[in-house]
Image (cartoon, grey):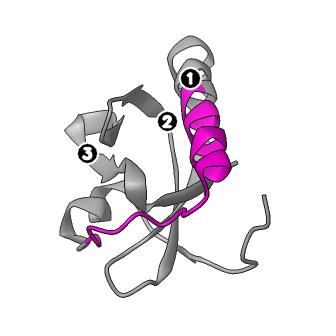
Amino acid sequence: MNHPTSSFNIEKEDIPQIKFSQNETLLSFKKRKLRAYYLERGTQLGNLLKTKVKIYFMDSSNKLLSVNTTIWAVTSNFVVLKQGITIPKHSILYIE
């Protein structure tokens, strides 16, 4: 995937204050499938190895944000982080 070069890094605890757009950030079906793959991979890394990943996502003003965190679970609509903090799946651009 082609990734933007700069993002604003935030703390996981700041995510509940973020307003997210209702729109899908990835228009390509192929990119959405790739995102799902990396989210599942990130979940496995988090649960098995306690490894953090960097999640890049967009807020409602199309600002690119990133957070270093452990993914605990992925539902059909959300990525669940520690302390029950969630990010809408449709807002996520990519995972490293």
Magenta highlight on residue 37: yes
Q: Secondary structure at mark 2?
A: loop
Is tag 2's residue or tag 1's residue first in the polypeptide sequence? 1
The disc at residue 96 is: none
Q: Secondary structure at mark 1?
A: loop
Nearer the camera: disc 1 or disc 3: 3
Mark 3 surroundings: few (<14), some (14-19) or many (≥20) residues within 10 A: some
Displayed quadrant of residue 27 = bottom right
**What residue would you read off at disc 2?**
70
Q: Are marks 2 and 1 in contact (CB under 8 Å)?
A: yes
Three-letter code, disc 3: Ile
The image position of residue 16, as x and y in percent, is 21, 60
The disc at residue 85 is: 3
Please tell me which residue is depicted at 32% across the width and 52% down the height of the picture: 88
Q: Secondary structure at mark 3?
A: loop
Q: Nearer the viewer, residue 7 or 32?
A: 32
Three-letter code, disc 1: Lys
> Over which residues does the magenta segment extend?
20-40
The disc at residue 50 is: 1
Please tell me which residue is depicted at 62% across the width and 23% down the height of the picture: 45
Q: Name the outermost residue toward the top.
A: 48
The image position of residue 6, as x and y in percent, is 69, 80
Please tell me which residue is depicted at 57% across the width and 12% down the height of the picture: 48
Is tag 3's residue or tag 2's residue first in the polypeptide sequence? 2
Three-letter code, disc 2: Thr
